[in-house]
Image (cartoon, coloured by chain):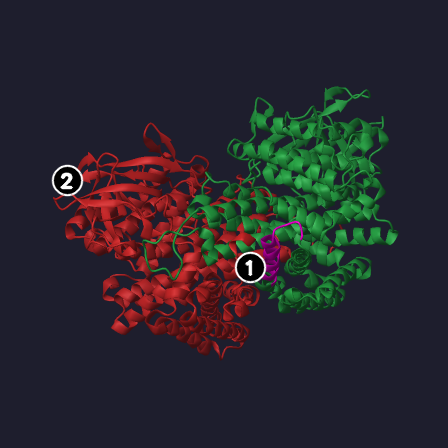
Chain colours: A red, B green
Amino acid sequence: MSQKIINTDDLAFLLYEMLDIERFTQFPRYADHSRDTFDAAIELALKVGAETFAPHNHLCDADEPRFENGKVVIRKEVSEALAVLRETGLMAASQDYERGGMQLPAAVAQTCIGLIKGANVSTQAYAGLTIAACNLIMAHGSDEYKQRFAEPMMAGRFFGTMCLTEPHAGSSLADIKSRAVPAGDGSYRISGNKIFISAGDHELSENIVHLVLAKLPDAPPGVKGISLFIVPKFLVNEDGSLGERNDVQLAGLIHKMGYRGTTSTMLNFGEKGGAVGYLVGEAHQGLAQMFHMMNEARIGVGLGSVMLGYTGYLHALEYARERRQGRPLKERNPESPMIPLIEHADVRRMLLTQKAFVEGGLSLCLFASTLVDEKKHAQSAQERDDAAGLLDLLTPIVKSWPSQFCLEANSLAIQVHGGYGYTREYPVEQFYRDNRLNPIHEGAHGIQGQDLLGRKVSMKDGQYYQGLLKRIRQTLADCAGEAELKTSCGLLGAALETLTGVTDALQSMRKEDPERALANAYLYMECFGHVVVGWMWLRQAQAALRGLKQGGERPQAFYQGKLNTCEYFLRYELPKPLALAEVLRNADRTTLDMPEECF
Amino acid sequence: MSQKIINTDDLAFLLYEMLDIERFTQFPRYADHSRDTFDAAIELALKVGAETFAPHNHLCDADEPRFENGKVVIRKEVSEALAVLRETGLMAASQDYERGGMQLPAAVAQTCIGLIKGANVSTQAYAGLTIAACNLIMAHGSDEYKQRFAEPMMAGRFFGTMCLTEPHAGSSLADIKSRAVPAGDGSYRISGNKIFISAGDHELSENIVHLVLAKLPDAPPGVKGISLFIVPKFLVNEDGSLGERNDVQLAGLIHKMGYRGTTSTMLNFGEKGGAVGYLVGEAHQGLAQMFHMMNEARIGVGLGSVMLGYTGYLHALEYARERRQGRPLKERNPESPMIPLIEHADVRRMLLTQKAFVEGGLSLCLFASTLVDEKKHAQSAQERDDAAGLLDLLTPIVKSWPSQFCLEANSLAIQVHGGYGYTREYPVEQFYRDNRLNPIHEGAHGIQGQDLLGRKVSMKDGQYYQGLLKRIRQTLADCAGEAELKTSCGLLGAALETLTGVTDALQSMRKEDPERALANAYLYMECFGHVVVGWMWLRQAQAALRGLKQGGERPQAFYQGKLNTCEYFLRYELPKPLALAEVLRNADRTTLDMPEECF
């Protein structure tokens, strides 16, 4: 199987050598599993990705979904690939055995999802949204709704969506206008307009289960008045058979720069009197419930962004090895043979940057997925709370860091390809266009920065933030004795002290002037993210050094590459956002004070 | 005239208050001109841009040139717009009166071209390539060729191309394989394959004049053996009428990520025995001659990149002022009215960054174009040499700095628009795709970095580099007494000292180990470029302060905005590339030492 989705050595290294996910087999839920079953699932996902998803990735970009005769027409390769995903059981990789799932740890299930994303992020989205919506119903829905809606979703017969955004409100969910009126029979009648609804209409599944945010007549104003409803495209009878078409209409398709294979829609609910909807859980709890899905979606965005960056990097690496161009600087004979691009220092810089970003990003996302397992299944309540808190703290980083830097990796992959990279005859430009969505959806960078500095860092009096610092300092202490890691420890240690100084200054400022403290929250997040990814790189270097010294499973050059890339990241990349430490420490007012009329 | 191409206050400020281009009316060549004639040309270009070029910018992106029945089919709006450009005389804005030109200074002519680029960079390219090719023939061609080929190009009847790249050689021009054999009658027979030839075939003009790099049979190896030939699509009889179709065949169209309106072609020369070509100037001088065009093209790339960034910024600014979303941080009442996006600090940060990049980039490009005027027409030989040397030194910066940072501005314009910005229903995503070409063509970033550090900085024992430092220090000295500029002077002065320290260290290292000294040339260029643009910003602030104090022509808020943006650039942007000063000073070997097998 030839594939440019993942370096399988790297994946195994991260899962088993850096993160030691074999330890999860000791959790009772995963007792039947072993490294063999983990690997079997991962190999299956990679095979499905490479053989079934990747081949039509470009086709669905060039021939995007169309609206024809009242229906959304999507290339047949999409439904064929999703059928394979369904048949292999990968759509229910993390679900319980008793519901037909594989009951795999999140770290393994996320890996499988990531491999499919790397092969074809647009087709995967139909499955990904379904899994997320299904998980939400499983977490908050009644047993009746679990059976009627979630189980057919796990089986891949129904697909799911999340309907949050409205045309006038964008990210401002407090201002949604969609309404839900009790129908007297326990159901509700939903009306309103939603926009940017991915997979909002199509013929790929028997039914579509929309999870819709709307307000009840007695709702308090703002986000406290939001409730969550299940609104199926076709009503579902008690025996599970499909009933009438519900009052949900496709108002139009949105044409995007990338991610074109995933249809993006405007939906009108209730134009004919009200769409039948079912309240999930309690009234007015919609935002908190949706955040269950949003947090999962945010980690999914980060992972998708990493995988787009990763496949771009592998394409650039192969091109740089095969394409011969130019000569070494010292070579004066113009008739000497041309050398491969990778031998030019500037090309190696671009490849190293990509490697640092995508392997750093992947280690971050997989680490986050181990926290999902630990928060649910670790032995002690303390461990579970630590993991849950750390995951909450890191979610804005996991969402936004890859969206920024793995997108940058995609740009560098184009640059390595030169003029060819800018053409649609090569795949790297599509990866770049696809990835440009990720800094926007599921909470744009600005919102993530506010979340990190305005909420997460100070959560429980900074308990989880302090927990993170403790973990990073522990890694530094563990590595202190290793001569090969001395430079890296020095660089990360200094950056950590800068970050803590900045954090303390901003936390003081928040008491005095919250607006000023939060004005540069996005830039703070860049520093925070780079320190966290620097930590991930030091942990990789630590594991690589162990592999080198103890003769690990992978080639020596692989381990050496991890050590070099760790130093590269800490030396070349870490300093850039931290160059604004003084601006942050002073809670600089330049952006705040720029009068609107001066633009 | 409603347009979002330029802030006309800003343009007038840069041309007249910062760069004082009215002084050019004292040069004998421009003696008939005045600020009124400059303004008339600029207004005309803006009107043509806004009314004739901008309206089909999106249409040619969605409906790109196609190959049908042996011809390239391009939307009719393109030829209509180019006809308007021809009829207004703007295609010959800088040419002599006696050849039908307007004899405008380069600073004004470039401004006019820039406004058309900002309106529609793809359609402008047909004219821009023609102007550049025409100028090359005017500089190096015989009188016969000037008359037969260049004059119909000035009149817009013939269009031009530059044919450098070949499929196997990319940027490595030493390795081109195209051949030219003397035909015995003074002409040559050309054969070979060229790729990425913009405007290489179309039906927009009566004829296409290809400027082709090829090698004569007795050519020395490498770049020293390259000659330049005129190869017209249709032969041109002595009376100027068109003759037979020449042996140049369109081998295919290339489909790009953006810039789609400009057809990009593969051309085969000499498949039927040899295309008739005419040697320009002396044999084996082709590269030097082509660099005449390339240097102009590189400034053109920088300007195009700025203008794409600029129009994106103006779109984002309007959107941020009109779109209401969310509430101030302090506002706890969810029923209070939503505020315009621009009132959010993070949105203001994104707008300030765009403003700093695009207005900084425009000042850089316009400053470079004043050097074009000075190097040709300044009174003393010393002044002319100073200007020519500084322009040479700055060309890699003028080409690459906007390509990087005004592209980043386009990304921020998308981000300000949120989900809407990612759709093709809004124009900002096209600007971003179009602009992504600019870091690649006319010499990619890596090549520009090598040119700057490997050639330009040390040219004539560093004379022009020292001249630049002197100019920057002079500006710092001139501003030293102004309290309002104290912070900015301090920030720029410190950065300048860092840059000179880095430069000195790398110049010493070059004597010892050139490969090591040049390994990070691209990162050096980032520092250099930011210091130069920082200088441009200080000069803008200096002029703005004068305007504030003396009651200049523009609103007070405009001048105040310049002061704020100068501080923003120096405080928030300048530190980032300079954070790698230590890596550069040490001529760090990390990228050089990464073994290929470790990737």
Q: Looking at the image, can residue A318 be seen?
A: no
- Give the number of the mark in front: 1 or 2: 2
Q: Which quadrant would residue B234 be assigned to in this image?
A: top right
Does the CB distance between marks 1 and 2 fall below 8 Å? Answer: no
Marks 1 and 2 sit apart, C-alpha to C-alpha, by: 56 Å
Q: Which mark is residue A352?
A: 1
Q: Amino acid at mark 2?
A: Asn
Where disc 2 sits, the SS reads loop
x then y, percent, for residue B290? 76, 41
Q: Which residue is mark 2?
A: A237
Quadrant position of residue B329: bottom left
Residue stretch rendered in magenta on the structure? B552-570
Left/right of residue A414 with respect to residue A95 in the rendered view: right
Majority secondary structure in the magenta region: helix
Is residue A97 rendered to the left or right of residue A256? left
In the displayed structure, does residue B157 sit left or right of residue A294? Answer: right
**Residue B250 disc label:** none
Coordinates of residue B47 in the picture (x, y in percent): 62, 34
Relative to the observer, which residue lies in front, B312 or A96? B312
x%, y% of residue B343? 46, 55
Relative vertical location of residue A551 with respect to residue A218 in this rendering, above or below: below
Mark 1 or mark 2: which comes first in sequence?
A: 2
- Check disc 2: other Cα within 10 Å, few if <14, some if 14-19, many if 20+: few
Residue extending farthest to the front is B551
Q: Nearer the viewer, residue A195 or A263?
A: A195
